[in-house]
């Protein structure tokens, strides 16, 4: 009986989550940010970045920053996988700022002395 209660509670909490997806691209990059918020005010931000060029090995290390009107996150000195993708994940607790459906999302990518800013729009 207690395990049934746990399963029901998990199902109820899963039903009350909200997900927002933002996408955008530039000449060299495409990006997607998926934000999932639960009823207990926790938030998971999953980020995907893809190099659109032919020679992935020419990119080297990159730095990216994700900025929203409520905060942001990023990483430095990371590399793309062999298919030209990079994924990142960040989690926010109830005390941190939240991304909302109408947030403005900008991603700055730096590589090989170049910089591009990608504006992401809600999908």
Image (cartoon, grey):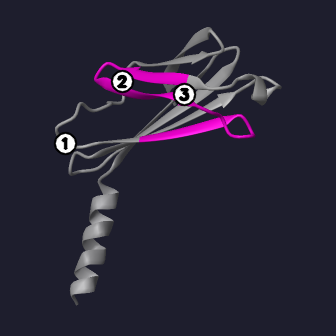
Residue 115: numbered disc: none
- Which residue occupies the foreground of this view, 81 or 50? 81
Furthest-left residue in this view: 95
User: Which element carries disc 1, helix, strand or loop?
Assistant: loop
Up-down: is 111 above or below 19? above
Furthest-bottom residue in this view: 1
Gap between marks 2 and 3, in whole Å?
A: 30 Å
Name the spot of residue 39 as percent of width and height, x first.
Answer: 23, 51
Q: Examine the structure image and report whether residue 92 is included in the region drawn in magenta.
A: no
Name the spot of residue 89 as percent of width and height, x first.
Answer: 45, 42
Identify the residue shown where x is 28% and y is 64%: 12
- What residue sits right under mark 1 in the picture? 94
- What residue sits right under mark 2 in the picture? 102
Gap between marks 1 and 2, in whole Å?
A: 19 Å
Residue range corresponding to the magenta coloring: 63-89
Q: Examine the structure image and report whether residue 78 is included in the region drawn in magenta.
A: yes
Instruction: Kindly indicate the quadrant of the structure image that contains residue 24.
Output: top right
User: Which element carries disc 3, helix, strand or loop?
Assistant: strand
Residue 27 relative to residue 35: left or right: right
Q: Dot 2 surroundings within 10 Å: few (below 14), some, or many (20 or more)?
A: few
Q: Dot 3 surroundings within 10 Å: few (below 14), some, or many (20 or more)?
A: few
- What residue sits right under mark 3 in the picture? 77
Name the spot of residue 103 as percent of width and height, x first.
Answer: 36, 23
**Nearest-to-viewer mark from 1 and 2:** 1
Magenta stretch: dominant secondary structure: strand
Residue 65 relative to residue 109: left or right: left
Q: Earlier in the sequence, mark 1 or mark 2?
A: 1
């Amino acid at each position: 009986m207690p395990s049934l209660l746990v399963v029901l509670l998990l199902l109820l909490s899963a039903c009350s989550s909200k997900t927002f997806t933002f996408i955008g691209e530039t000449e060299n990059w495409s990006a997607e940010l998926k934000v999932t918020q639960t009823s207990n005010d926790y938030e998971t931000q999953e980020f995907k970045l893809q190099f659109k060029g032919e020679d992935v090995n020419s990119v080297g290390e990159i730095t990216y920053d994700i900025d929203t009107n409520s905060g942001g996150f990023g990483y430095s000195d990371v590399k793309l996988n062999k298919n030209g993708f990079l994924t990142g994940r960040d989690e926010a607790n109830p005390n941190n700022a939240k991304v909302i459906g109408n947030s403005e999302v900008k991603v700055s990518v730096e590589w090989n002395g170049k910089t591009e800013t990608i504006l992401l729009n809600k999908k």
